């Protein structure tokens, strides 16, 4: 730790001031022992009339350890610090002032009272102050200034600029207050800075060197008359100095030995700069200033709350003092930090494990999700496939129906209608495969087509049977070729000709109608021929027919034969059938049947333009209307 | 008045008068030194309190940081001023007949006893230099016996002597004016306190004679 030297009045010794150490020791010094010793001495003196010097000396020596300045001044201004403490104790315990105590001891009856009287008289005449009270107040001052400059709530230490700013602010506030209260700068303690040779009283501090120098100049000053005391006037300082200079202006350079002797004597000061405080506050302020200059910073320990010197090696705000637990604050902090680090590590490990577990779970969940997605996609695909694939059974039915219709082109269906139907079937299948139509729709179409086929086939048979009944022998030469599906007509060049159904004209054959059959007779004939009539209860029909015939015969009425509903095209028939079926289902499920999409009719309306004026636009009314 | 030891009482009273005179002489010097450096440091009121509470011990003023050396009161360290002390003692001695007014019950000091005290004081060196002091022992004895009012103890003779015999103090300057100013007040107050001191002494000597515990 850096140290400086200082001297005081009426003392030829040099004293060492260790920066920061002296300040910390002073602010934390325990004066309990000193206080107890003083009270004990005072009580003894009150009984015996004489202050016990051994106790007083013990108390003084105890107080001297609080600060080097007190130690230096122990033989002068702090000589009566124990008496000061006794006086302060009497005044505080008996609730009296110094004036009353002084008057009480004005005719001292013993040495104790005389001592107190003399000490208070010194207070009264400004020759002394109560140094015990002074120390107490100085401790408060040092603590307050230390708190002001170095107290910091944040973890990282203060910067040099911050410390300097705080110190300057505090000192400036003190100077302003002193000025406002009417004190001159000389009225408050300050520190003078000297080189050893220019120190006041250097002739007494360096006696040997002074004697040697006196011998060198004694010839010149022998006849000089000592100056009578003229009073302390700063304005006369230069004049005094020049009067002194008159006697040494002919000083010659000494021999090397003399020069070396003087320099060796001055070197005994062990310091190139000597500080000369004029009061306790001065040296405390000096310590703060030098600490800031030397980069010695204090910090408050976060554990014990006491200040300590901040070192560069250990940046944490914990001191090295031993606490009641037997450990230093720094050690406690290290253990605490280690515990925190362990906890952090455990926490991190736990977090890592949790994260790993979570990651594993997430991975499993993702896999599961992927699996489910895959399954769902497969199911969806299967469903879609099932949904968008024409069932084999339906495919066979459609193929069978196609073939059946194809074979009967020209009989029960003409070619154009067949093409239209087959195109529709093909499109519907394609739509089913694309998902734009359902299998049910295809199935419904197939059912309607099959129904249509059956109806037409029956119709065709009926018409054919009717013809067979009437026509004795079919016209052989007009019989269509049987392998019409297998053999396509080919051109001479071998190219396949476009399908063109052959037409057979039967009109050129004469048809003799033996007897005109009624519908009932036709149905009976169909039943006898073993033909099935769709959606017709043959027995009932026959029963009815016979009954009706009987009835008709009896009543003379005639019954018309069943005529299936006729459509202009197969598509209309399908729509009619599908619509009827859908409407029936909608009535059953009380749901609105899906209606085929009908695009809305385009309505062209007349634009409703509003005529606006320029003024209405600028006034904003039109925009309001527009907004509305 | 009956004393257990009349000789001791007479010497004791004479000693008190002489000590009082010496105290007054030194106290003037101490207080005069205030004007040298401690004019604003030492309260003259405190100095009066100290002296008047220690009527036979002027050195108590040293507690106030006052000292009587050549630096502080070199003007008083002259042969002429040294004659002040016998004059002060004489001025006090001529007023000894006032002791007759001090009673212990119905008992009081006789003229013979007072004369013996006066003679003892005069024997210690008191004298009226150049008849500066106008009052005389017989004059005061007459006034006391007749019960007439006594003239107050003042510093008139002191100032007269200074003007006549101590030119260093007669010079008009801050310090000397301070001296002549406080002397008027101080002499009167001092004599009043000295009278109380003598009364206490007389009662003390007479109480011892009758074995009466004294409580002042």
Image (cartoon, coloured by chain):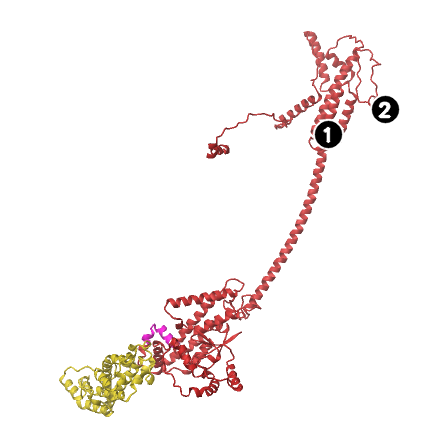
Chain colours: A red, B yellow
The region drawn magenta spans A85-101
Frontmost of labels 2 and 1 is 2
The residue labelled by disc 1 is A429
Q: Residues within 10 Å of mark 2 (few under 14, many from 20)?
A: few
Give SS at disc 1.
helix
Front residue of A364 and A159? A159
Asked if the residue under mark 1 is in contact with the one under mark 2, i.e. CB atoms within 8 Å, the reply is no
Q: Is residue A493 magenta?
A: no
Q: Is residue B146 left or right of residue B38?
A: left
Determine the residue located farthest toward the front in the rendered image. Answer: A250
Badges 2 and 1, same chain? yes
Q: How many marks?
A: 2
Crowd band around label 1 with a 10 angstrom C-alpha radius: few (<14), some (14–19), many (20+): many
Mark 2 falls on what kind of element?
loop
Q: Residue drawn at (68%, 48%), measured in percent from left and top?
A: A364
| Most foreground residue, A212 or A152 | A212
Side of B124 where A167 appears, left or right: right
Q: Quadrant of residue A466?
A: top right
Give the main secondary structure of the magenta stretch: helix
Closer to the camera in the image, B193 or A533 = B193
Q: Label 1: chain?
A: A
Which chain hosts label 2? A
Is residue A108 visible from the viewing direction of this image? no
Q: Residue at coordinates 23% horizontally, 88% vertically from top-left?
A: B87
Say whether residue B37 is visible.
yes
Residue under numbered circle 2: A494
């Amino acid at each position: 730790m850096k140290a400086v030297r200082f001297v005081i009045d009426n003392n030829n010794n040099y004293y060492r001031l260790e920066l920061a150490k002296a300040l910390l020791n002073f602010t934390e010094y325990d004066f309990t022992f000193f206080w107890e010793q003083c009270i004990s001495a005072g009580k003894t003196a009150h009984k015996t009339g004489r202050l016990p010097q051994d106790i007083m000396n013990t108390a003084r020596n105890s107080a001297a350890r609080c600060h080097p300045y007190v130690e230096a001044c122990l033989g002068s201004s702090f000589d009566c610090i124990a008496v000061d403490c006794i006086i302060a104790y009497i005044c505080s315990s008996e609730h009296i002032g110094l004036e009353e105590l002084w008057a009480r001891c004005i005719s001292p009856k013993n040495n104790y009272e005389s001592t107190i009287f003399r000490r208070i008289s010194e207070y009264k005449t400004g020759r002394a102050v109560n140094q015990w009270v002074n120390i107490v107040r100085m401790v408060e001052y040092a603590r307050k200034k230390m708190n002001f400059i170095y107290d910091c709530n944040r973890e990282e230490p203060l910067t040099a600029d911050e410390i300097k700013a705080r110190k300057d602010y505090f000192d400036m506030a003190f100077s302003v207050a002193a000025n406002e209260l009417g004190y001159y700068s000389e009225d408050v303690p300050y520190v003078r800075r000297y080189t050893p040779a220019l120190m006041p009283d250097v002739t007494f501090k360096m006696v040997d060197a002074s004697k040697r120098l006196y011998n060198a100049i004694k010839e010149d000053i022998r006849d000089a008359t000592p100056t009578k005391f003229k009073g302390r006037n700063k304005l006369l300082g230069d004049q005094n100095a020049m009067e002194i200079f008159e006697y040494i202006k002919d000083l010659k350079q000494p021999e090397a030995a003399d020069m070396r002797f003087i320099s060796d004597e001055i070197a005994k000061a062990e310091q190139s700069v000597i500080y000369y405080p004029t009061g306790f506050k001065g040296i405390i302020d000096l310590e703060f200033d030098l600490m800031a200059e030397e980069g010695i910073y204090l910090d408050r320990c976060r554990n014990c709350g006491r200040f300590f010197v901040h070192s560069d090696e250990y940046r944490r705000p914990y001191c090295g003092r031993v606490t009641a637990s037997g450990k230093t604050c720094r050690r406690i902090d290290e253990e605490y930090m280690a515990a925190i680090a362990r906890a952090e590590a455990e926490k991190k490990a736990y977090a890592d494990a949790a994260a790993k577990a979570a990651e594993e779970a997430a991975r499993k969940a993702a896999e599961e999700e992927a699996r489910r997605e895959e399954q769902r996609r497969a199911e969806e695909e299967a469903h879609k496939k099932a949904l968008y694939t024409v069932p084999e059974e339906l495919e066979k039915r459609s193929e069978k129906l196609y073939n059946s219709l194809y074979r009967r082109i020209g009989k029960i269906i003409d070619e154009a209608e067949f093409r239209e139907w087959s195109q529709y079937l093909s499109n519907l299948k394609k739509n089913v495969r694309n998902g734009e139509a359902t299998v049910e729709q295809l199935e419904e179409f197939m059912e309607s087509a099959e129904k249509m086929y059956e109806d037409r086939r029956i119709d065709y048979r009926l018409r054919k049977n009717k013809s067979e009944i009437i026509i004795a022998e079919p016209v052989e030469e007009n019989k269509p070729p049987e392998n019409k599906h297998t053999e396509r007509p080919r051109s001479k060049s071998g190219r396949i000709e476009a399908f063109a159904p052959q037409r057979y004209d039967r009109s050129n054959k004469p048809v003799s109608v033996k007897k005109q059959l009624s519908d009932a007779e036709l149905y009976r004939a169909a039943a006898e021929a073993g033909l099935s009539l769709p959606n017709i209860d043959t027995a009932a029909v026959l029963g009815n027919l016979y009954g009706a015939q009987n009835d008709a015969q009896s009543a003379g009425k005639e019954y018309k034969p069943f005529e299936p509903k006729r459509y202009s095209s197969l598509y209309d028939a399908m729509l009619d059938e599908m619509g009827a079926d859908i409407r029936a289902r909608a009535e059953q499920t009380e749901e609105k049947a899906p209606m085929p999409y009908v695009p809305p009719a385009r309505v062209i309306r007349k634009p409703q333009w509003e005529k606006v004026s320029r003024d209405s636009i600028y006034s904003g009314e039109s925009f309001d209307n527009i907004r509305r | 008045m009956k004393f257990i030891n009349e000789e001791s009482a007479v010497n004791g009273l004479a000693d008190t008068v002489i000590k009082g005179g010496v105290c007054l002489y030194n106290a003037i010097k101490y207080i005069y030194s205030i004007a040298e450096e401690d004019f604003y440091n030492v309260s003259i009121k405190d100095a009066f309190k100290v002296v008047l509470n220690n009527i036979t011990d002027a050195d108590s003023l040293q507690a106030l940081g006052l000292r009587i050396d050549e630096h502080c009161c070199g003007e008083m360290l002259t042969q002429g001023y040294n004659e002040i002390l016998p004059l002060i003692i004489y001025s006090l001695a001529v007023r000894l007949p006032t002791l007759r007014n001090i009673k212990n019950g119905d008992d009081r000091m006789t003229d013979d006893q007072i004369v013996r005290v006066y003679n003892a004081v005069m024997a210690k060196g008191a004298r009226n230099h150049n008849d500066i002091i106008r009052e005389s022992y017989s004059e005061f004895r007459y006034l006391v016996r007749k019960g007439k009012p006594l003239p107050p103890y003042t510093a008139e003779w002191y100032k007269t002597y200074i003007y006549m015999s101590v030119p260093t103090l007669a010079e008009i300057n801050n310090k000397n004016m301070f001296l002549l100013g406080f002397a008027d007040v101080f002499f009167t107050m001092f004599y009043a306190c000295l009278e109380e001191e003598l009364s206490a002494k007389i009662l003390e000597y007479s109480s011892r004679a009758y074995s009466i515990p004294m409580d002042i």
